[in-house]
Image (cartoon, helix red, strand yellow):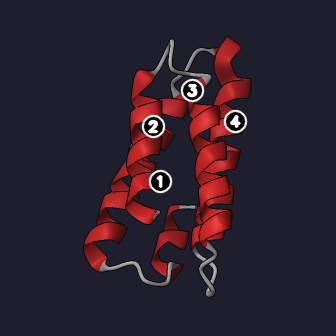
Amino acid sequence: MIDDIENMPNGDVAVQRNLRRSFSGLRDILTRLPEDRMMEAELVAEQSKAFLETASQSRVNQTMIRSASAGLRQAAERLDDVAPRVLELCRQITDQVE
């Protein structure tokens, strides 16, 4: 998934580097969550992938990006009680693209 960052149109090198760092940190946290929170972790991972796919389209559609951003943030909010950094990283990711 992180490799898809390079396919983003309008993404300069600094933004791509920051996104790569944020997605990497997100992946590290999600893989270490307790077993009973794996469903929520998988939801965040799926929403991250959907967000990145939307943002990587050759024709940028701001409505779709905002929708994907909202989905990612809502998924991250479900983990805020055990991993508040997940929501913080998701906000960083979406803020850089919107």
Q: Mark 4 falls on what kind of element? A: helix
Residue 50 visible in the picture:
yes
Q: Three-letter amino acid code at disc 2?
A: Asp
Q: CA distance from mark 2 to mark 4?
A: 13 Å
In the picture provided, is 94 more to the left or to the right than 39?
left
Image vertical order of residue 68 relative to residue 79, above or below: below
Q: CA distance from mark 3 to mark 2?
A: 17 Å
Mark before the other along the chain sequence, 2 or 1: 2
Q: How many marks?
A: 4
Q: Which residue is mark 1?
A: 94
Q: CA distance from mark 1 to mark 3?
A: 14 Å
Residue 42's tag is 4
In the picture provided, is 40 more to the left or to the right than 10?
right
Q: Which residue is mark 3?
A: 77
Q: Depth-wise, is mark 2 or mark 1 nearer the camera?
A: 1
Q: Residue at x 45, y 37 (%)?
A: 28
Q: CA distance from mark 2 to mark 1?
A: 18 Å
Q: Mark 3 falls on what kind of element? A: helix
Q: Mark 1 falls on what kind of element? A: helix
Q: Three-letter amino acid code at disc 4?
A: Glu
Q: Residue at x 36, y 70 (%)?
A: 16
Residue 53 visible in the picture:
no
Q: Quadrant of residue 11?
A: bottom left
Q: Which percent across, then down, holds residue 88? A: 39, 35
Q: CA distance from mark 1 to mark 4?
A: 18 Å
Image vertical order of residue 29 relative to residue 45, above or below: above
Check whether the beta carbons of the residues at disc 1 and disc 3 lie within 8 A of each other. no
Q: Which percent across, then down, holds residue 3? A: 51, 69
Q: Three-letter amino acid code at disc 3?
A: Glu
Q: CA distance from mark 3 to mark 4?
A: 13 Å
